[in-house]
Amino acid sequence: MPKVPESRRVERMAVNEVRALLERHGHIVQEIDGGNDFGEDLHVTFVQDGRRTADAVAIQVKGGTSTRTRRGHRVRIGTHGDNWRDGIPPVLCVVHDPERGGLFWAHATRQLRRAQALRKTPKSIVVQAESLLDDHSLPSFVESIRTYLRWERQGVARWADMADVEFAHNDTVKSFVNDCGEPMVFQQGHGKTFAVLLHHDLDWEPFRITESMLHLEPLPMLGPIPKIGGIVLDSAEAHWLTACFKTTEWTRSQAAKPAPATE
């Protein structure tokens, strides 16, 4: 009789552990047939209050000790990098290591988009030892992923990934593409007195901005040039930022109000 390789038992146990955890909390898990497995083992649709949602992710599952590092785990990307970065739905990596506590997860799509912004080509997805996935952490995990998927549908999650920031569910986020094809993102956090600008020309480093920073700077021979702080804008970018500030003025005015006095 042919011998069943140990690696198969380990991988099956890992997939079953992930499936069991998600199904225990009512989510819909579809396993991808091994013959059609191109770097994704499970397709998960999240359920809320017994109702199926529009939110879904793909999961690559790994088991055993081969992924271990001193500080967590690493999942080799191999030939899956482009699909994990740009495919639909987003891809997560989950490692099963019972000797270290169970299941650990990482957002492969986010890591690969950030690497793209830094002009790097990583060979593996980093899974932090702190990113434990269990019955206790699953609700917050699902909430964070569903928030991410909301921004993904609105077409701005990619820019958050590239800047290595996360948009909260109640943020106001507006995007713009200039005539050079360079995207810009305006993020107004709820209860914040400032906004954040993400810009291709800034290498996606988050830049805090306020409306008072938006001005015209006179330059010899060129006339007035629009700027936000020290960043040069073209006319369309300046008008777009002005509109962003005007339409989010209410949230900053609320944040600037003093807290009510207590007796």
Image (cartoon, helix red, strand yellow):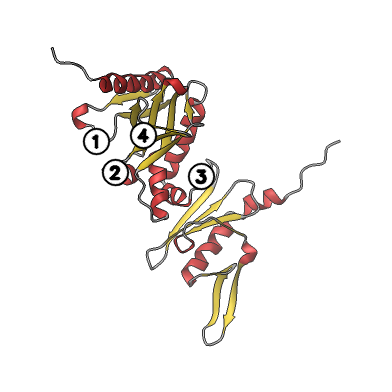
Residue 80 in sight: yes
| Nearest to N terminus: mark 4 or mark 1 | 1
Question: At 31% across and 28% down in the image, what residue appears?
Answer: 42
Task: Provide the secondary structure element on which disc 3 rests.
Answer: loop
Query: Is 31 placed left or right of 95 in the picture?
Result: left
The residue tagged 1 is: 38
Circle 3: residue type: Glu
| Nearest to N terminus: mark 2 or mark 3 | 2
Q: Is residue 58 above or below residue 80?
A: above
Q: Residue furthest front?
A: 70
Circle 1: residue type: Phe
In whole angstroms, how far apart are the C-alphas of marks 4 and 1?
15 Å
| Nearest to N terminus: mark 2 or mark 4 | 4
In whole angstroms, how far apart are the C-alphas of marks 2 and 3?
22 Å
Rendered-image quadrant of the C terminus: top right
Mark 1 or mark 3: which is in front? Answer: 1
Q: Are marks 2 and 3 in contact (CB under 8 Å)?
A: no
Q: Residue furthest top?
A: 1
Q: Are marks 1 and 2 in contact (CB under 8 Å)?
A: yes
The residue tagged 4 is: 57
Residue 166 badge: 3
